[in-house]
Each structure stands twice: as structure tokens, then as C-alpha cells.
Image (cartoon, rainbow, N blue to C red):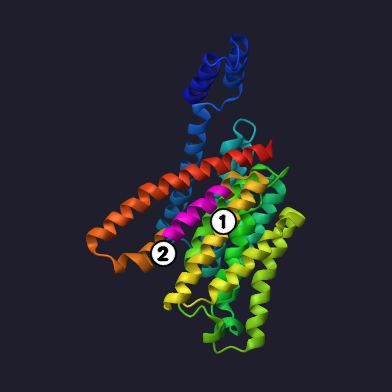
Amino acid sequence: MDRTTNKLVERWEAAGVIDAPTAERIRAFEREHAPSHASRFGRFAFAFGGLLLGAGVLLFVAANWDQLSPWGRFALLAATVAVLHVGGAVAHIRSPALARTLHAVGTAALGGGIFLAGQVFNLAEHWPEGFLLWTVGAAAALLLLRDWAQAMWVAVLAPAWLISEWLGSETLRSVPIGPLLAGLFVLSAAYAAAVGPDRDATWRRALALLGAVLFVIAAILLPLEPGLRPGTAPGSKALLLTAWGLVLAVPLLLGTLLRGREAWPLLILASAAVCAAHIDVSDTTQLVALHLLYAATCAGLVWWGVREGHRLRINLGVVGFAMTVLSFYFSSVLDKLGRSLGLIGLGVLFIGGGWMLERARRHLVERSREVRS
């Protein structure tokens, strides 16, 4: 049992909220069910070790690449993938965490093997197919292992394949990447919304965390990439509308599969993404409108998180709101103040605004717990 829980139990016992036998039962329960520090260290060691193992495999292959014949290179790549997955199967009985790490590194090695094999046999005519094969391999591993790590690989590789097909397409070359980033924005929101009432599996929590990271990245890139606005593209309107329809339909369909009818807020987020992609950040008025749009979007995420008792969505909305306020300050306020006043205002914003946001966040998290209970 950690110190925080012990202090809370002592405070409740001192205040007369619980009696001594109840306090002892709470301590016993927490000692029995609390995660041990060793297990946390083990998870960190396996994750970090997996990264080092993958890097070591790549370096080993690169160091001996020129000395091998084409078929020798292919055999080395196939053996690397096979050894990692066989090792994961052997380790599953004694250490499921180690097995998960080895299988995840094996899927990573599969991708490297696909692209290197294509290079060996000069099969790089259409490079996005490498991502497609990698995605198929990760999906097969997911069906066999039912592991959240393989689900993360599929969640990353499937969009990577679609994006690579977009970038490598001759037809879509005349279309700006605004629709593509908008689709990534909605897709990350669908990932972040994977967790909901009675939908709290491990792979869903991992997918939601991945979606939160991608959401911040997509929100930053969406209004800043040059040439985002569809009006600046020489492509036909029909092609442009088709592209917009595809990039929005895919994540909305995925969100429906993950959450069913509860995914309807994704429609609002998709509308916000379309609006953000059409905003010209060089115009002062439109820049202010963008900040207001993002602030409203973050407020919607917070509301969605409170409504479903999802803490990550609340934190994502609060962090996004804070980043929006800082962006507005730097883009529209700081240059109108002197150096000293600008720093003073920034300090007040961090201290006062940070205190208010943290207080509001804690209150919202408590409300979400009440909703969940």
C-alpha cells in the first residue's frame, strides 16, 4: 500500500469516518491488490529492453548487409522475425510480459524485413504496398495473439498505409494534404474515444492513449501546413470532394465500430476539422477564429469525458485548452506588449491560469468518477 492511501485511511480514522477494524480491512485490501513496484519496474524494463533489442537487430543486420548475398539477406531477415516470435511463444508460460515484448519486436522486425527484402529484389515499384504487407502481418499476429501491443501496431500501420497510398498516388498529387490531416485529426479522436462505459479493455485504454498523442499532433499541423486550403489546389472540385468524403468517412466508420451510437460527437469534431483546414492563419481575424474553434473543441472533449467518466479525455481537453490559450497569447498578445510586460503577463498566465485549470480539472475528474460509479 502506498503512502497516499495510508495517509487517507489515517485521516478518515482520526476524523471518525471509519473505525479501526474498517481501517485495517482497507489496508489489507490495498496491500493485496495494489500493484507492486517490481511489476512496474518489470514493465518498464521490458518496454525499454524491447526498444534496445529492436535497435540492436537493425544495427546487426545493417552491419552485415553488404557481406551477404541476396538470398542470404532474405534468410537473415526471415530468421530474425521467426526467432523473435518463437522466443515469445516459449516465454509466454513463464512471463507473459516478456512474450508480449518479443512478439512486438518481431512485428517491428517484420516491417524492416519487408522493406529490405523489397530493396534486395528490386520490388520497390509501389512502396506503399510494403506498409500494406506489414499491416497484414500485424493483423495476423493480432488475430493469433489477441494482444494489445499488436493492436497498437495495427492502429499505427493501417493509417500509415493509407497515408502512403495518398502521398504516392498520381491522381491525388494535385489535392492538398488538408483533407489528409483532417482525417488524421478525426481518426485520433476516434482512437481517444475507444474507452467508454463497459468498454474498458486493455487494448482500448492503449488505443485511447495513442489517440490522445496523435490528436495533439494533428491539431497543431492542421492549420499550419502551407497549401492546406482546398481553394488553393489546382485539382478538380469533384476529386477534392471525393477526397474529403473518404478521409472523413473512414475514421467515422471506425468510431462507429468502436463505440456504436455513442460515437456521435465525432461528427462535431469532423466539422471542426473541416473548418480548421479552411482557415488562413496569416489573417488575424481568422487566426482568432481558429483559437476560438479549438477552445470550443477542447471544451467539448472535456464535456464528453465527464459525461462518460473518462479521465484521459478530460485531461486531453484541459491540456488542449491550455495550449490554445498559450498559442493565442504568443500570436496575438505578446507582440503588442513590451518585453518586460510580456514576460510578466506570461508568468501570470502560467501561475494563475495553471492554478485555475488544475482546480477545474480536479473538479471535473471527481464529477466523472461520480458518473462512473
Name which residue lies at 58% across and 21% down.
30
Q: Residues within 10 Å of mark 1 (few under 14, many from 20)?
A: some
Q: Is residue 316 magenta?
A: yes
Direction from residue 51 to residue 188 in the image, left or right: right
In what element is the residue under mark 1? helix
Q: Residue 333: name its quadrant.
A: bottom left
Q: Secondary structure at mark 2?
A: helix
Q: Is residue 95 above or below residue 106?
A: above
Q: Which residues are drawn in magenta?
A: 314-325
Q: Which residue is mark 2?
A: 328
Residue 203 in percent (x, y) is at 65, 46
Residue 129, picture quadrant = bottom right
Marking on residue 299: 1
The x, y position of residue 71, in whole percent, is: 55, 63
Q: In this image, 11 relative to 326: left or right?
A: right
Q: Residue furthest right?
A: 261
- The percent position of residue 225, horizontal first and vertical second, equals 46, 74
Seen from the viewer's position, the closer of residues 250 and 83 is 250
* Figure quadrant of residue 33: top right
Q: Amino acid at mark 1?
A: Ala
Residue drawn at the location 59% of the way across and 42% of the way down = 100
The answer for how far apart the CA atoms under marks 1 and 2 are is: 16 Å
Left/right placement of residue 302 relative to residue 352 reads right
Residue 55 highlighted magenta (yes or no): no
Point out the image quarter for the C terminus.
top right
Q: Amino acid at mark 2?
A: Phe
Q: Does residue 163 show up?
A: no
Image point (42%, 76%), residue name = 284
